[in-house]
Image (tube, rainbow, N blue to C red):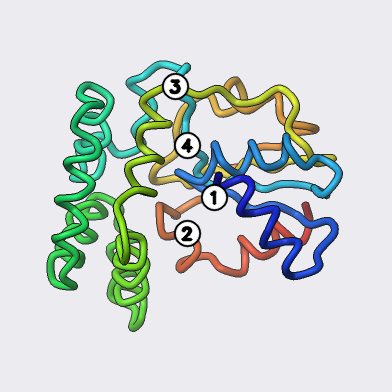
Amino acid sequence: QAADDMARVMDALRIDRAKVLIRDSSTPAGLLFTCLHPDRIVAGVAVNPKWPASADRKLTVRLPTSMLGVLSKAFMENPHMIDLVAEILRRQTRSDLMEKVMRQSLTHIPCDVQALKTPGVMESLVRDAQAMFARSSAGFAAEHRAFVAGWEVPSNVGGERWTVAECGHVAMPDAQVIFGGLPNAQFRIIDDAGLLVYFTHPALIADLVANA
């Protein structure tokens, strides 16, 4: 459904072809979109992409000791709990609780801790999290059900070339092995960057897309 939604957005904006930027949990849907609509994809950039569940399951969680990492691992081991936990989370989206979760999850990434002190960053993250649960927990639950069910990097990804960027503080090993099948894939490490790379290195991300 998410892949179809992307196509509808492009149609509404009257965009025939575009470059694709995917990150973290949007990886499966983003890659599927390029498979379903290869004629509409110029090139792609993947930043801190989600690891497929078909790879070593220990590596599918980028920050396994963080609160969100622990939750992701719990979902893998107890998928029947996903819908219940998702609904509980939806009811606990007060701003102060969201801020606490953000700080705890990023506490081991110095550049991200510093980014949270920048005016507007925490507020933006909290608004995004609250918007995700604004009406329903269904999307969050569906996303995690897809992860635990297992997925693989498709062999027919669209786009003439791809750049896969791992951020130094959260980089996963063997990205070339996992994502080497993407068209004309190039790989790079973004030094002194973590999960909030879009706030700490916005110009660099813009350049990656522009040069893709």
> Residue 185 location, x and y as percent?
73, 34
The answer to which quarter of the image holds residue 27 is top right
- Identify which amino acid the numbered label 4 is placed on: Lys
In the image, taking residue 143 as reference, residue 23 lies left or right, namely right
Q: Are marks 3 and 2 in contact (CB under 8 Å)?
A: no
Residue tagged 1: 190
Label 3 – label 2 distance at C-alpha:
27 Å
Labels 4, 3: front one: 3
Q: Nearer the viewer, mark 2 or mark 4?
A: 4
Q: In the structure shown, which secondary structural element does the residue marked by tag 2 occupy? A: helix
Mark before the other along the chain sequence, 3 or 2: 3
Q: Which residue is mark 3?
A: 150
User: In the rendering, at what x and y percent does residue 131 appear?
Assistant: 35, 67
Q: Amino acid at mark 1?
A: Ile
Q: Nearer the viewer, mark 3 or mark 1?
A: 3
Describe residue 113's horizontal placement relative to residue 143 as left or right: left
From the image, tell me which residue sits under label 2.
197
For marks 1 and 4, give the CA distance: 16 Å
Q: Residue furthest bottom?
A: 119
State the residue at coordinates (73%, 41%).
Answer: 162
The answer to whether the residue labelled 2 contacts the one labelled 1, judged by CB atoms less than 8 Å apart, is: yes
